[in-house]
Image (cartoon, grey):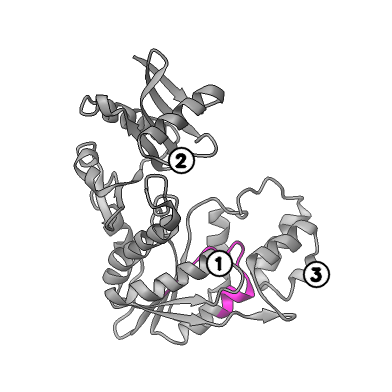
Amino acid sequence: MELELGPLRGRRFQAVREFLSQNGLMPPEAPPAFTVTLLEEGRPLATGSLDGGVIQYVAVDSGCQGGGLCAAVVSHLTRQALQEGREHLMLCTKPENRALFAGLGFYPVTETAGMLLMENRRNGAADFVAALPKPPPGAWPAGAVVANCNPFTRGHLWLAEQAAARCGFLYFFLVSEDRSFFPADVRLELARQNLADLPHTAVCPTGDYLISAATFPTYFLKDQANAAFHSAELDLKLFAERFAAPLGITLRFVGEEPLCPVTRAYNRQMMDLLPAWGVRTVVLPRLEEGGAVISASRVRELFQRGELEALRPLVPGPTYQYLLEEYRHGASGHSGN
């Protein structure tokens, strides 16, 4: 049996895509960063890929299941992740695969009827949340905002201020997934600077959990037409069970979404699903400037065009200073969206 490690290219990528399709998975459009493929006479028998700290696209030929090939694939992916400095790994699979991946050292985080999220730490999610700040006694109700802040705008500041005024303690969660134009550490630091004077508010990272590549997979779902719905359901259930319940969060604040239909659908789903866990969604109107809502995408466009003066009314002081310094230093190489 042959073993191939690394990025897929050309005919091999097409062969693996066909193999994934034959095994009921939606193949990736572009080659994953790292893939393990076990082959026999050039024919794939098992495969799996690694995207950051997320294991994806694991499939084993139906005639070879139970022969240890899945364990071999996951072992190679784990070794690669360690070489990249990643110790925490996550994967999303069908609930019927729980025993298989549990035997390979993965533990359930949350699940829905069609999706099961697992990680390689026994109490990873619980330990992460336990380390977050706790509301002081009598600070009720507790609320939450989950935002990407790419970058932090006056709209984000207004949302945080309105949310904080409606609750006794506010968690302002910054998405930790590092796939945005501005790096995760920069986005987190700007949020902390801009919200430093907002009372009873804690700015916290989401870690590997909320709104991440791990919680929004769709490649193994047969119902691709509603894949976004099912992924959002998993993400919202994780928030409710692993974050809201132990932290006592009963309010989640979001801004109205006139621009992005995907986010608008996610917010509607939030309003429908979270009450089952005792969490009410509060939708706040978006802050406007010059007759248009303030959006991070608008800020990025102006920044990339070098229209720094036009940025002033859209971002608070710390963000503006950061953008000004970045532009003056000729910052480049940002990626993502």
Are the residues flagged by discs 2 and 1 in contact, CB closer than 8 Å? no
Residue 309 is labelled as: 3
Callout 2 crowding tier (Cα within 10 Å): few <14, some 14–19, many ≥20: some
Residue 244 on image: x %, y %: 32, 71
The residue indicated by pointer 1 is: 261
| Residue at image point 43% right, 20% down | 4
Q: What residue type is disc 3 on?
A: Glu
Q: Residue at x 56, y 82 (%)?
A: 285
Residue mark closest to the camera, 2 vs 1? 1
User: Image height check: is 188 above or below 137?
Assistant: above
> What amino acid is found at the position of numbered circle 1 in the picture?
Pro
In the drawing, does residue 147 fall left or right of residue 72?
right
Left or right: residue 87 versus residue 108 is: right
330 vs 141, nearest the viewer: 141
In the rendered structure, which segment of residues is drawn in magenta? 144-158
- The kind of secondary structure element at disc 2 is strand
